[in-house]
Image (cartoon, rainbow, N blue to C red):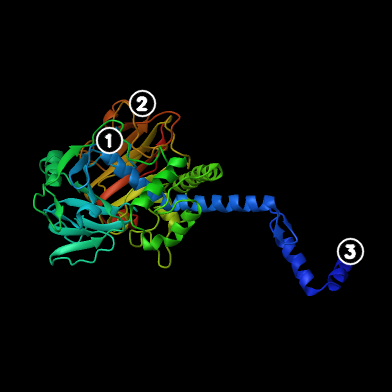
Amino acid sequence: MASCANHQDEQAGKPAADTQAATAAANFSPHYEFKNGYPTTETVQKAYDDADLNRAIQTYRFFYPSVSILATWEGNLRGGVLPNKIFAILDGTPEQLVFTPNSDTKYAGLTLDLGELGPMVVEVPPGPIMSVVNDLNQLYVMDIGLPGPDKGKGGRHVILPPGYKGTVPPGLYSATATTNRVLVLVRAIPQQGGAEAAEAMIKSVKVYPLNKQAGWKDPTWVSLNKPGLEFTPVPWENNIQYWQKLHELIDQEPPNTAYRAMYGELAELGIEKGKPFNPDARMKRILEQAAQAGNAIMRVQSFADRRPGKLAWKDRQWEWAVLQYTNGTFDAANYTDLYAREKWFYQAQIESPAMFNRAPGAGSLYWLGVKDKTGAYLDGGKSYKLTVPLPVPDKLFWSVTIYDVFTRSEIATDQKKAALRSMFELKDKTGSAIDLYFGPTAPAGKEGVWIKTIPNKGWFTYFRIYGPEEAAFNGSWKPGDFEEVK
């Protein structure tokens, strides 16, 4: 007590300003050194390194959706697509690298460059077409077809470029993108005539400029079913290429007003529209460290989610693939749910209210499976059984698709399939339930309801329901957990 009293006596004898200065100095982080209140040379360097690293990790995570969708755009171009001129058809198979696709229906990718031709019209016929438009910020623009304003009755939709000031003729549904380049994803639900009829319906979609000039030629189509074609940012995501691609995107597209603060953070890192990106050795080291840390953080959030509301049912390991579902664009009542946004875009691509809406009759419903019944991560070297009660509460179809945890693409084995689907392998299955199998080898007699996995490689799954009914939400129906089969 005497030492404390002596200290108090000493403080009492000092001017108030000196006492405040001493207190402030004591409150500085022990990791930084200050002399007479000013930073030392070593502290200046450390503080700026820490600030830039923190800034880079935050911007890495924020702009990941933009870099991811740019990879898809570039993958299309490598496959022979030309914006506004040649569109893509793709089957969801393990042969291509695509974030969590499914193999239920064919995909069509319409790459549009509004900066070249101005507003573009997408005219769809009546029928079971599901379409969504995202721009190169991977922001939702509009739904078309069954989930859109035409409700599957057919209609004309016009996509407007950023800052468009012109008029829109009556009778068109319109929406404005935040970038000049946009992706229109189109799917047709197979009915009579199967996959071929569905592809014909996709190709009946008409695309043309709102202000069509003489000599306009209708776009043609190219198949992207080419082994090894890459549509993901995985080759870039943990190195300096991530930042180079981000700079290219920002330099080529108009700024999004909603991102002004984040553009300011990027500018401190040397990434700014209209200026070259030439990081010195220090900044390159920091950016690569941030890419690795940011990617690791997003992987943890995706596969070790800490949110208490992640589980679809309290007695199951199944999680909601999409945490935030207020309006399909990760907007909660008072903030943007960046955690939910990062979890989704690390695994998947494209945002849409129809994809995320947890309501009967909504476009689709996704559950994420990463663990077995005991809570252990799914292991490619083990065998599992998944029991699915029948009938599944879907108005359209359902499927279980598994993915390589490293690439987040369909698992690639010599079996050459990664999905079990109600429209194909499981079409004629009846009874009160069906058992599905996953593992390195098929159980005897179960080859038709089995997906091959790879030892020493983790995998995860999406259980999808298209046109989910009430039972998918109220707990009266739910799939079993993955159970290890010895």
Determine whether label 1 and label 3 are within 8 Å by CB: no
How packed is label 2: few (under 14 Cα within 10 Å), some, or many (20 or more)?
Answer: some
Amino acid type at circle 3 is Ser
Rendered location of residue 486, percent (x, y)? 43, 29
Rendered location of residue 249, percent (x, y)? 36, 49
Which labelled disc corresponds to residue 441? 2
Determine whether the residue tagged by mark 1 lies in a helix, strand or loop: loop
Reading the chain from its start, which is encountered first: label 3 or label 2? 3
Q: Give the CA distance from mark 1 to mark 3.
A: 75 Å
How packed is label 1: few (under 14 Cα within 10 Å), some, or many (20 or more)?
Answer: many
Q: Nearer the viewer, mark 1 or mark 2?
A: 1
Q: Is residue 266 visible?
A: yes
Determine whether label 3 and label 2 are within 8 Å by CB: no
Amino acid type at circle 2 is Thr
Reading the chain from its start, which is encountered first: label 1 or label 2? 1
Instruction: Name the residue nearer the viewer: 203 or 194.
Output: 203
Determine whether the residue tagged by mark 2 lies in a helix, strand or loop: loop
Instruction: Name the residue nearer the viewer: 157 or 352.
Output: 157
Determine whether the residue tagged by mark 3 lies in a helix, strand or loop: helix
How packed is label 3: few (under 14 Cα within 10 Å), some, or many (20 or more)?
Answer: few
Amino acid type at circle 1 is Thr
Instruction: Name the residue nearer the viewer: 318 or 173.
Output: 173
- Going 32% across and 45% down the picture, which residue do you hit? 463
Disc 3 marks which residue? 3
Q: Please give left or right for residue 148 compared with residue 295 in the image.
A: left
Q: Nearer the viewer, mark 3 or mark 2?
A: 3
Reading the chain from its start, which is encountered first: label 1 or label 3? 3
Disc 1 marks which residue? 93
- Going 88% across and 65% down the picture, which residue do you hit? 1
Locate residue 285: give its quadrant.
top right
